[in-house]
Image: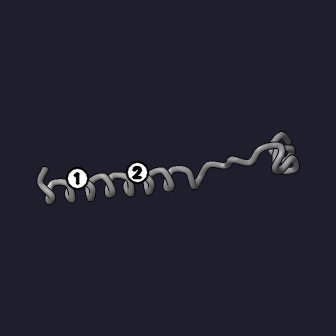
């Protein structure tokens, strides 16, 4: 296979991974993952 083609494919794969990671990080910032085991007081204040 052509070396230039392999390099381009590797770069494209790297760019797609980077874009996916940025997209995932941007969407998960606003989500609260606190569980009852981590912070029972926080969850009890929500129930009120």
Using the image, determine if residue 48 lies above or below residue 15. Answer: above
Using the image, determine if residue 31 lies above or below residue 8. Answer: above
User: To which residue does mark 2 refer?
Assistant: 20
Out of 3 and 41, give the one closest to the viewer: 3
- CA neighbours of label 1 inside 10 A, class few (<14), some (14 to 19), many (20+): few
Q: Position of residue 13 (x, y in %)?
A: 30, 52
On the picture, is 2 further left or further right than 41? left
Q: Residue at x 68, y 47 (%)?
A: 33
Out of 32 and 15, give the one closest to the viewer: 15
Q: Position of residue 22 (x, y in %)?
A: 44, 57
Q: Residue at x 14, y 59 (%)?
A: 4
On the picture, is 16 further left or further right than 48? left
User: To which residue does mark 1 refer?
Assistant: 9
Out of 11 and 40, give the one closest to the viewer: 11
Q: Position of residue 39 (x, y in %)?
A: 83, 50
Using the image, determine if residue 36 lies above or below residue 5. Answer: above
Residue 2 is drawn in which quadrant?
Answer: bottom left
Disc assigned to residue 19: none
Q: Which quadrant is home to the C terminus? A: top right
């Amino acid at each position: 296979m052509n070396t230039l083609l392999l390099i381009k494919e590797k770069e494209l794969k790297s760019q797609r991974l980077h874009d996916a990671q940025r997209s995932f990080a941007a969407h998960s910032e606003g989500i609260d993952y606190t569980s009852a085991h981590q912070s029972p007081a926080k969850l009890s204040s929500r129930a009120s």
